[in-house]
């Protein structure tokens, strides 16, 4: 398993079939990218470490790189404006990256659906994505990735798979109520494993990184990520070298069974 690097942005990715693939990523915000519950538990008086910010920024950068143009969507069930407001207050360094994503809020009327409140919105976004790409290019395959910390964040994958049989719809579930340290470890783990998750053409499409918070060795990887990001910032400030271009080779998964497994973090 290779560690993802910051390469040039591609709105489409080559596949093993000689065609291309477009990826739609639907990303939860609270307790997936921002440790909201831990912030609340500290009375809103918490300062996120530079290392945490570096890891979160690297994850957003990678998702922006892998996803199609306008294909990274931050989907929140919170009130309108909360994503931008909370980002500005607790992680202002992430604001430029969040600004490049499309922010969508679930309608208030859907909240009565409980854990299923995101399903109608996710399915609508998936339908729009698939229709748009079908019109633009018949040779481009579609893929969808759902990332969140609640079962309701990834449950819509079942509906999308029924609507679009054969289209890869993958999910990644994080811990429901993480501390700042736990979320930092999970994001580090996700950053380390995301490319392998997308390239996996085995029998599993649903993953969990919730157990990553238990692995002390993730701390070392977090430190390496933070150090590397600091070096990149320094090189950019000095007019340093450009990042190398790499293209992910993708193969279409076989028809999948719905169950979960943990991502494996390799050195």
Image (cartoon, rainbow, N blue to C red):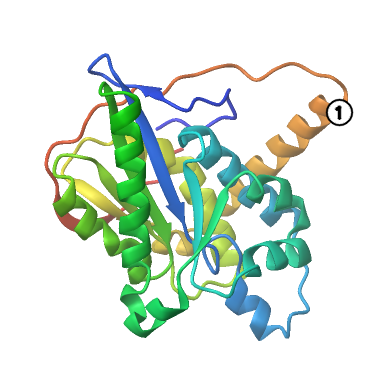
180 versus 6 height, above or below: below
Residue 251, horizontal then vertical, whole percent: 25, 26
Quadrant location of residue 195?
top left
Query: Residue at position x 20%, y 59% from top?
Result: 158
Residue 85, horizontal then vertical, whole percent: 71, 67
Q: Is residue 29 left or right of residue 236?
A: left
Residue 262, horizontal then vertical, whole percent: 32, 55
Query: Residue at position x 65%, y 20% from top?
Result: 243
Q: Is residue 43 left or right of residue 150?
A: right
Quadrant where the N terminus sits is top left
118 versus 38 height, above or below: above
Residue 216 visible, this orientation: no
Residue 180, horizontal then vertical, whole percent: 62, 68
Determine crowd level at label 1: few under 14, some 14-19, many 20+ residues with C-alpha closer than 10 A. Answer: few
Please, which residue is most extreme toward the front here? Answer: 135
245 versus 229 height, above or below: above
Q: Could you say whether the residue bearing mark 1 is in a helix, strand or loop? A: helix
Query: Residue at position x 45%, y 30% from top?
Result: 2
In depth, the one of 2 and 63 nearer the eye is 63
Query: Residue at position x 14%, y 46% from top?
Result: 256
How many numbered marks, from 0 up? 1
Residue 173 visible, this orientation: yes
Quadrant location of residue 165?
top left
Residue highlighted by disc 1? 237
């Amino acid at each position: 398993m290779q560690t993802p690097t910051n390469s040039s942005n591609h709105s489409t990715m080559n596949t093993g079939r000689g065609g291309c693939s477009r990826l739609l990523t639907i990303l939860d915000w609270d307790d997936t990218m921002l440790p909201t519950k831990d912030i609340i538990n500290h009375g809103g008086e918490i300062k996120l470490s530079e290392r945490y910010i570096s890891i979160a920024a690297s994850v957003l950068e990678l998702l922006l790189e892998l996803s199609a143009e306008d294909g990274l969507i931050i989907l929140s069930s919170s009130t309108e404006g909360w994503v931008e407001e909370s980002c500005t207050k607790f992680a202002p360094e992430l604001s430029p990256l969040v600004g490049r994503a499309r922010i969508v809020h679930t309608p208030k009327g859907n909240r009565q659906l409980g854990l299923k409140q995101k399903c109608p919105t996710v399915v609508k976004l998936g339908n729009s994505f698939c229709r748009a790409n079908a019109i633009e290019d018949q040779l481009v395959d579609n893929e969808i990735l759902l990332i969140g910390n609640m079962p309701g964040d990834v449950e819509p994958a079942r509906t999308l798979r029924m609507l679009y049989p054969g289209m890869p719809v993958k999910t990644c579930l994080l811990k429901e109520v993480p501390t700042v340290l736990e979320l930092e470890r999970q994001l580090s783990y996700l950053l380390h494993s995301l490319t392998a998750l997308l390239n996996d053409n085995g029998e599993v499409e649903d993953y969990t990184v919730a157990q990553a918070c238990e692995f002390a060795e993730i701390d070392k990887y977090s430190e390496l990520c933070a150090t590397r990001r600091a070096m990149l910032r320094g090189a950019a400030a000095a007019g340093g070298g450009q990042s190398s271009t790499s293209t992910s080779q993708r193969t279409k998964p076989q028809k999948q069974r719905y169950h979960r497994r943990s991502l494996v973090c390799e050195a």
